[in-house]
Image (tube, grey):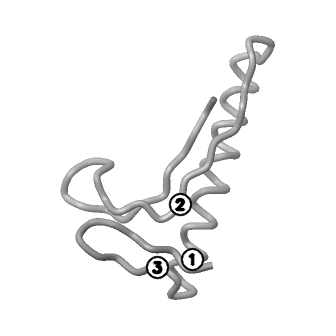
Amino acid sequence: MIGATCHYVTEDLDEGPIIEQDVIRVGHHCYRSAMIRRGRDVERAALSRGLLYHLADRVLVHNNKTIVFS
């Protein structure tokens, strides 16, 4: 599986409150180039949804945790 996380930025690397996460399956049949492309695709999807939720004011942050309203 290849995954990506969209989160708010903090002083600590990759420790900010999570807005969105996504994963896709890969198999042993996937070549390196396909894995790179799929990784980019899942990162793009998670980031775009996270930004959409933030810009739509659908994210509530409390004590380094998030609640995302649908």
Task: Give the alpha-carbon distance from disc 3 to disc 2, as whole Å.
Answer: 10 Å
Which numbered tag is attached to residue 68?
none
Left or right relative to 49: residue 64: left
Q: Where is residue 65 in the image (x, y as percent from the top left)?
A: 33, 66
Left or right relative to 53: residue 35: right
Residues 28 and 69: in front is 69
Q: Position of residue 33 (x, y in %)?
A: 72, 23
Q: Where is residue 30 in the image (x, y as percent from the top left)?
A: 77, 18
The residue pinned by badge 3 equals 59
Image point 33% across, 48% down: which residue? 14
Q: Cβ–Cβ below 8 Å for labels 1 and 2?
A: yes
Image point 19% across, 58% down: which residue? 11
- Quadrant the C terminus occupies: bottom right
Q: What element carries label 1?
A: helix
The residue pinned by badge 1 equals 53
Task: Give the alpha-carbon distance from disc 1 to disc 2, as whole Å.
Answer: 9 Å
Q: What element carries label 2?
A: strand
